Protein backbone atom coordinates (compact mmCIF):
# COMPACT_ATOMS: atom_id res chain seq x y z
CA UNK A 1 0.00 0.00 0.00
CA UNK A 2 1.26 3.44 -0.91
CA UNK A 3 1.21 6.21 1.68
CA UNK A 4 1.39 9.97 1.35
CA UNK A 5 4.95 11.24 1.35
CA UNK A 6 5.74 13.92 3.92
CA UNK A 7 8.06 16.84 3.26
CA UNK A 8 10.43 17.34 6.20
CA UNK A 9 12.92 20.07 5.46
CA UNK A 10 14.17 19.26 1.96
CA UNK A 11 13.44 15.54 2.35
CA UNK A 12 10.42 13.62 1.10
CA UNK A 13 9.74 10.78 3.53
CA UNK A 14 7.55 7.79 2.71
CA UNK A 15 6.97 5.98 -0.60
CA UNK A 16 10.71 5.94 -1.11
CA UNK A 17 13.86 4.66 0.56
CA UNK A 18 13.91 3.62 4.19
CA UNK A 19 14.54 6.77 6.21
CA UNK A 20 16.13 7.31 9.60
CA UNK A 21 15.27 9.59 12.51
CA UNK A 22 18.07 9.37 15.05
CA UNK A 23 20.01 11.21 17.72
CA UNK A 24 20.46 11.29 21.49
CA UNK A 25 17.46 10.95 23.79
CA UNK A 26 17.90 14.40 25.28
CA UNK A 27 20.15 17.41 24.77
CA UNK A 28 22.96 17.06 27.27
CA UNK A 29 25.26 19.63 25.65
CA UNK A 30 25.96 21.16 22.22
CA UNK A 31 29.12 19.06 22.10
CA UNK A 32 27.14 15.83 22.43
CA UNK A 33 24.88 16.85 19.54
CA UNK A 34 27.90 17.54 17.34
CA UNK A 35 29.58 14.25 18.26
CA UNK A 36 26.46 12.34 17.24
CA UNK A 37 25.89 14.34 14.05
CA UNK A 38 29.55 13.86 13.08
CA UNK A 39 28.83 10.13 12.81
CA UNK A 40 25.22 9.97 11.64
CA UNK A 41 25.20 12.57 8.88
CA UNK A 42 28.08 11.13 6.80
CA UNK A 43 26.83 7.60 7.47
CA UNK A 44 23.40 8.44 6.07
CA UNK A 45 25.02 10.05 3.03
CA UNK A 46 27.16 6.97 2.38
CA UNK A 47 24.18 4.66 2.59
CA UNK A 48 21.74 6.89 0.70
CA UNK A 49 19.39 7.08 3.70
CA UNK A 50 17.25 10.21 4.17
CA UNK A 51 18.14 11.41 7.66
CA UNK A 52 16.44 13.58 10.30
CA UNK A 53 18.37 14.53 13.45
CA UNK A 54 16.44 14.27 16.73
CA UNK A 55 16.99 15.23 20.33
CA UNK A 56 14.59 16.36 23.05
CA UNK A 57 15.04 19.76 24.66
CA UNK A 58 12.85 18.54 27.54
CA UNK A 59 11.81 15.11 28.78
CA UNK A 60 8.69 16.02 30.70
CA UNK A 61 7.65 12.41 31.38
CA UNK A 62 10.61 11.09 33.38
CA UNK A 63 10.07 8.42 36.03
CA UNK A 64 11.40 10.57 38.89
CA UNK A 65 11.37 14.26 39.68
CA UNK A 66 15.12 13.91 40.12
CA UNK A 67 15.71 12.62 36.59
CA UNK A 68 17.55 14.81 34.10
CA UNK A 69 15.04 16.57 31.85
CA UNK A 70 17.19 18.53 29.44
CA UNK A 71 17.73 22.22 28.80
CA UNK A 72 15.35 25.15 28.49
CA UNK A 73 13.26 25.20 25.32
CA UNK A 74 14.87 28.33 23.85
CA UNK A 75 18.36 27.00 24.50
CA UNK A 76 17.51 23.57 23.13
CA UNK A 77 15.93 24.91 19.96
CA UNK A 78 19.01 27.08 19.37
CA UNK A 79 21.26 24.04 19.83
CA UNK A 80 19.22 22.04 17.33
CA UNK A 81 19.14 24.89 14.82
CA UNK A 82 22.94 25.00 15.03
CA UNK A 83 23.05 21.32 14.04
CA UNK A 84 20.84 21.94 11.02
CA UNK A 85 22.95 24.92 9.97
CA UNK A 86 26.23 23.04 10.36
CA UNK A 87 25.22 19.67 8.90
CA UNK A 88 22.33 20.46 6.56
CA UNK A 89 19.92 17.90 8.04
CA UNK A 90 16.32 18.50 9.17
CA UNK A 91 15.70 18.57 12.93
CA UNK A 92 12.96 17.10 15.14
CA UNK A 93 12.08 17.40 18.81
CA UNK A 94 9.18 16.70 21.18
CA UNK A 95 6.60 19.18 22.37
CA UNK A 96 4.60 18.56 25.54
CA UNK A 97 2.26 21.55 25.82
CA UNK A 98 0.05 23.36 23.32
CA UNK A 99 1.86 26.66 23.90
CA UNK A 100 5.14 25.12 22.80
CA UNK A 101 3.84 24.27 19.31
CA UNK A 102 4.00 27.70 17.62
CA UNK A 103 7.34 28.53 19.23
CA UNK A 104 8.98 25.22 18.33
CA UNK A 105 7.52 25.34 14.82
CA UNK A 106 9.53 28.48 14.11
CA UNK A 107 12.71 26.39 14.43
CA UNK A 108 11.99 22.69 14.01
CA UNK A 109 11.37 20.93 10.71
CA UNK A 110 9.12 18.36 12.39
CA UNK A 111 7.20 18.37 15.68
CA UNK A 112 6.93 15.15 17.65
CA UNK A 113 4.13 14.18 20.01
CA UNK A 114 5.31 11.82 22.78
CA UNK A 115 3.47 8.52 23.19
CA UNK A 116 2.00 9.42 26.58
CA UNK A 117 0.41 12.52 25.01
CA UNK A 118 -0.94 11.10 21.74
CA UNK A 119 -4.57 11.50 22.85
CA UNK A 120 -4.19 15.07 24.11
CA UNK A 121 -6.55 16.78 21.69
CA UNK A 122 -5.46 20.37 22.30
CA UNK A 123 -1.81 19.43 21.82
CA UNK A 124 -2.55 17.61 18.56
CA UNK A 125 -4.62 20.51 17.25
CA UNK A 126 -1.94 23.03 18.17
CA UNK A 127 0.71 20.98 16.38
CA UNK A 128 -1.47 20.58 13.29
CA UNK A 129 -2.23 24.32 13.20
CA UNK A 130 1.47 25.11 12.71
CA UNK A 131 1.36 23.37 9.28
CA UNK A 132 4.67 21.72 10.18
CA UNK A 133 5.02 17.94 9.78
CA UNK A 134 3.96 16.08 12.91
CA UNK A 135 5.22 12.69 14.07
CA UNK A 136 2.87 11.10 16.60
CA UNK A 137 4.09 8.19 18.67
CA UNK A 138 1.41 5.60 19.38
CA UNK A 139 0.71 5.38 23.09
CA UNK A 140 1.75 2.20 24.87
CA UNK A 141 -1.87 1.98 26.01
CA UNK A 142 -3.46 2.08 22.53
CA UNK A 143 -4.26 -0.53 19.93
CA UNK A 144 -2.91 0.36 16.49
CA UNK A 145 -6.42 0.88 15.11
CA UNK A 146 -7.06 3.46 17.83
CA UNK A 147 -4.62 5.74 15.99
CA UNK A 148 -7.36 6.39 13.44
CA UNK A 149 -8.79 8.93 15.88
CA UNK A 150 -5.42 10.67 16.13
CA UNK A 151 -5.19 10.82 12.34
CA UNK A 152 -8.67 12.32 12.10
CA UNK A 153 -7.95 14.96 14.75
CA UNK A 154 -4.82 16.17 12.96
CA UNK A 155 -6.25 15.91 9.46
CA UNK A 156 -9.30 17.89 10.51
CA UNK A 157 -7.18 20.70 11.97
CA UNK A 158 -4.53 20.88 9.28
CA UNK A 159 -4.48 23.94 7.01
CA UNK A 160 -6.17 23.23 3.66
CA UNK A 161 -7.13 19.79 5.02
CA UNK A 162 -3.72 18.39 4.03
CA UNK A 163 -2.19 16.60 7.01
CA UNK A 164 1.61 16.33 7.09
CA UNK A 165 1.65 13.38 9.41
CA UNK A 166 3.73 10.35 10.38
CA UNK A 167 2.86 7.67 12.94
CA UNK A 168 5.36 5.80 15.11
CA UNK A 169 5.00 2.37 16.67
CA UNK A 170 6.94 2.02 19.94
CA UNK A 171 5.54 -1.03 21.69
CA UNK A 172 2.54 -1.78 23.87
CA UNK A 173 2.36 -2.23 27.64
CA UNK A 174 2.66 -5.88 28.59
CA UNK A 175 2.37 -6.34 32.34
CA UNK A 176 4.51 -4.29 34.69
CA UNK A 177 7.64 -2.51 33.34
CA UNK A 178 7.45 -4.37 30.03
CA UNK A 179 6.61 -3.58 26.43
CA UNK A 180 5.86 -5.93 23.56
CA UNK A 181 6.04 -5.06 19.85
CA UNK A 182 3.25 -6.29 17.61
CA UNK A 183 4.54 -6.01 14.06
CA UNK A 184 1.01 -6.17 12.64
CA UNK A 185 0.66 -2.62 13.99
CA UNK A 186 2.81 -1.41 11.09
CA UNK A 187 0.53 -2.44 8.19
CA UNK A 188 -2.51 -1.64 10.33
CA UNK A 189 -1.44 1.99 10.79
CA UNK A 190 -0.16 2.33 7.20
CA UNK A 191 -3.72 1.76 5.98
CA UNK A 192 -4.55 5.27 7.22
CA UNK A 193 -2.37 6.62 4.41
CA UNK A 194 0.64 8.06 6.22
CA UNK A 195 4.23 6.84 6.71
CA UNK A 196 4.76 4.55 9.69
CA UNK A 197 8.01 4.60 11.65
CA UNK A 198 9.27 1.96 14.04
CA UNK A 199 10.96 3.19 17.22
CA UNK A 200 13.37 0.33 17.84
CA UNK A 201 15.01 1.79 20.93
CA UNK A 202 11.97 2.81 22.99
CA UNK A 203 10.39 -0.53 22.12
CA UNK A 204 13.04 -2.28 24.25
CA UNK A 205 12.53 0.14 27.12
CA UNK A 206 11.38 -1.14 30.51
CA UNK A 207 9.32 1.83 31.76
CA UNK A 208 10.13 2.58 35.37
CA UNK A 209 12.02 -0.70 35.48
CA UNK A 210 14.85 0.69 37.60
CA UNK A 211 12.53 2.13 40.22
CA UNK A 212 13.42 5.81 39.75
CA UNK A 213 14.33 5.45 36.05
CA UNK A 214 13.47 3.35 33.02
CA UNK A 215 15.47 0.26 32.20
CA UNK A 216 15.91 -1.39 28.85
CA UNK A 217 17.52 -4.15 26.82
CA UNK A 218 19.44 -2.57 23.95
CA UNK A 219 20.66 -5.99 22.77
CA UNK A 220 17.16 -6.57 21.34
CA UNK A 221 17.13 -3.40 19.22
CA UNK A 222 18.53 -5.07 16.06
CA UNK A 223 16.07 -7.96 16.33
CA UNK A 224 13.05 -5.69 16.51
CA UNK A 225 14.38 -3.32 13.86
CA UNK A 226 14.89 -6.17 11.39
CA UNK A 227 11.37 -7.45 12.05
CA UNK A 228 9.87 -3.99 11.58
CA UNK A 229 11.57 -3.42 8.23
CA UNK A 230 10.43 -6.86 7.09
CA UNK A 231 6.90 -5.87 8.17
CA UNK A 232 7.03 -2.83 5.89
CA UNK A 233 7.81 0.21 8.03
CA UNK A 234 8.68 3.37 6.11
CA UNK A 235 11.29 4.66 8.52
CA UNK A 236 13.25 3.81 11.62
CA UNK A 237 13.64 5.81 14.84
CA UNK A 238 16.78 5.23 16.92
CA UNK A 239 18.14 6.95 19.99
CA UNK A 240 21.92 6.77 20.00
CA UNK A 241 24.78 7.98 22.17
CA UNK A 242 28.59 7.84 22.15
CA UNK A 243 28.50 6.09 25.55
CA UNK A 244 24.96 4.93 26.44
CA UNK A 245 25.97 3.72 29.90
CA UNK A 246 26.86 7.31 30.78
CA UNK A 247 23.83 8.90 29.11
CA UNK A 248 21.68 11.16 31.28
CA UNK A 249 18.42 9.69 29.97
CA UNK A 250 17.34 6.36 28.44
CA UNK A 251 20.85 4.93 28.44
CA UNK A 252 19.75 1.27 28.83
CA UNK A 253 17.80 1.30 25.57
CA UNK A 254 20.05 3.55 23.43
CA UNK A 255 22.45 2.20 20.82
CA UNK A 256 26.14 3.06 20.84
CA UNK A 257 27.14 5.11 17.81
CA UNK A 258 29.43 2.45 16.24
CA UNK A 259 26.50 0.00 16.17
CA UNK A 260 24.30 2.14 13.95
CA UNK A 261 25.93 1.71 10.54
CA UNK A 262 26.20 -2.10 10.64
CA UNK A 263 22.54 -2.26 11.67
CA UNK A 264 21.44 0.11 8.92
CA UNK A 265 23.28 -2.00 6.32
CA UNK A 266 21.33 -5.05 7.47
CA UNK A 267 18.05 -3.15 7.37
CA UNK A 268 18.69 -1.81 3.88
CA UNK A 269 19.41 -5.35 2.67
CA UNK A 270 16.09 -6.51 4.12
CA UNK A 271 14.33 -3.57 2.53
CA UNK A 272 15.89 -4.36 -0.85
CA UNK A 273 14.72 -7.98 -0.57
CA UNK A 274 11.14 -6.79 -0.22
Image: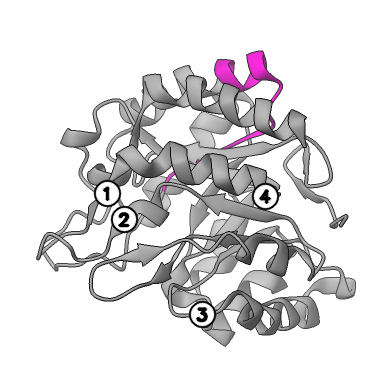
At horizontal 67% and vertical 50% (from top left) the residue drawn is 233
In the image, residue 14 above or below residue 172? above
How far apart are labels 1 and 4 at the CA level?
23 Å
Q: Position of residue 140 (x, y in %)?
A: 43, 72
Q: Nearer the viewer, mark 1 or mark 2?
A: 2
In the image, residue 55 above or below residue 115? above
Can the viewer see residue 32 in this picture?
Answer: yes
At horizontal 46% and vertical 18% (from top left) the residue drawn is 39
Of callouts 1 and 4, which one flags the residue occurring earlier in the amino acid sequence? 4
Q: Position of residue 187 (x, y in %)?
A: 72, 62
**Image quadrant containing the N terminus:** bottom right
Mark 2 lies on a secondary structure that is strand
Mark 3 lies on a secondary structure that is loop
Mark 4 lies on a secondary structure that is loop
At horizontal 41% and vertical 55% (from top left) the residue drawn is 203
Q: Is residue 190 left or right of residue 135?
A: right
Q: Which residue is mark 2?
A: 205
Kindly check if marks 2 and 4 are in contact, taking CB atoms under 8 A apart as contact. no
Amino acid sequence: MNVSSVKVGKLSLGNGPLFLIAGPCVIESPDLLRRVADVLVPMAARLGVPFVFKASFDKANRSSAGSYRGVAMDEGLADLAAIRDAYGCPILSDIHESGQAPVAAQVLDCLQIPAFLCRQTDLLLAAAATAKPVNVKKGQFLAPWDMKNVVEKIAGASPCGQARLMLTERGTSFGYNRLVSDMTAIPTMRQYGYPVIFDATHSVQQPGGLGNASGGNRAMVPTLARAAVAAGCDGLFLEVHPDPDKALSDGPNMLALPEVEPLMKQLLAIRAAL
